[in-house]
Amino acid sequence: MNNKNELLKEIDSRRIPRHIAIIMDGNGRWAKKHGYSRLRGHQEGVKAVRKIVEIAGQIGVDYLTLYAFSTENWRRPKDEVIGVINLIRRTLLKEIDNLDKNNVVVQFIGSKDKMDKKFLKDTKIACAKTKNNTGLHLSLAVNYGGRLEIIESIRKLVLDIQQKKEIDVKNIDEQMFSKYLYTKDMPEVDLVIRTSGEQRLSNFLIWQSAYSEFWFTNTFWPDFGAEEFLQAVIEYQHRTRKFGGIK
Ligand code: FPP
């Protein structure tokens, strides 16, 4: 297996994907394999998050978006749901000063609906500290669903049309609509990575990944590290992106 420094030499610094989105899958199966609780799997997952944030910043990725809790994850047992949401909040509070020191901008994307007040308040205060940073933009997708994002955007757009009479329905196009999404200030996704052997999008960034490249690995998320992340980027750099045209 190539080590990290050898892989770093293979990276073309002129073609770093601007926006990488990751579906961090397999914490539960990792835990089962090791005879631990599912929550322990998520705790190990946090360690992998730390490594990936670090390497993404190091190679100059501008935007990293992590799928931490989906709108479908509410269907899990209540103690797991509470455990994951608390883990995200506590990890953020613990790491925020370090992230801030490293010039990372942290934000959450997802619906506020159903999220408890403490989570919303604590995460808002923590993220605000980093808002003037200029390094990696780390977005945590929590209570996120791509279809719900589109529905919530349509609601906002319709309200704007009703309130501000100057919006002409004829002027609604992709660029204008994308300003209503949670990701309004972010570029489209260049590369989607999914761990644990599943090969589907599961309602993640369905608008923003229309032209993304995909990279899959069988590795469970807690075992995913800098080496595999670099391999994904290297493979991305060897692909030809055509956006529907001819190259
Ligand atoms: C998927 O594995 C993982 C999740 C639904 C939770 C991911 C959350 C974290 C790693 C914590 C992130 C924390 C921060 C601060 C970003 P799974 O439970 O679906 O695994 P399985 O498919 O093997 O059961």
Image (cartoon, rainbow, N blue to C red):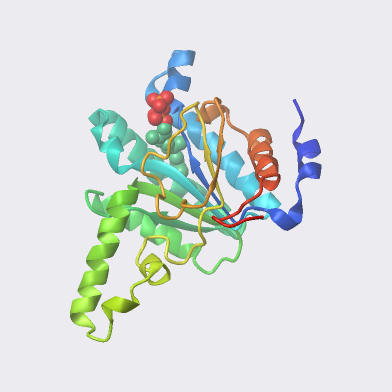
Instruction: State whether residue 190 appears in this view.
Output: yes
Q: Quadrant of ligand 1?
A: top left
In this image, 52 relative to 186: left or right?
right
Q: Quadrant of the C terminus?
A: bottom right
Q: Nearer the viewer, residue 85 or 157?
A: 157
Residue 76, position as x, y percentages in the image: 27, 30
**In the figure, residue 136 lies in which quadrant?**
bottom right
In the picture as drawn, the residue positioned furthest to the bottom comes out as 166
Residue 30, position as x, y percentages in the image: 48, 21
In this image, 192 relative to 8: left or right?
left
Residue at image coords 56%, 29%: 217
Residue at image coords 62%, 34%: 225
In this image, 112 relative to 62: left or right?
left
Residue at image coords 51%, 32%: 195
In the picture as drawn, the residue positioned furthest to the front comes out as 246
Against 76, residue 119 (above or below) is below
Q: How many marks?
A: 0
Instruction: State whether residue 40 appears in this view.
Output: no
**In the figure, residue 231 lies in which quadrant?**
top right
Against 207, residue 76 (above or below) is above
**In the figure, residue 242 lies in which quadrant?**
bottom right
Residue 82, position as x, y percentages in the image: 29, 36
In this image, 49 relative to 227: left or right?
left
Against 105, residue 224 (above or below) is above
Q: Nearer the viewer, residue 1 or 122?
A: 1
Q: Quadrant of the N terminus?
A: top right
Residue 70, position as x, y percentages in the image: 34, 42
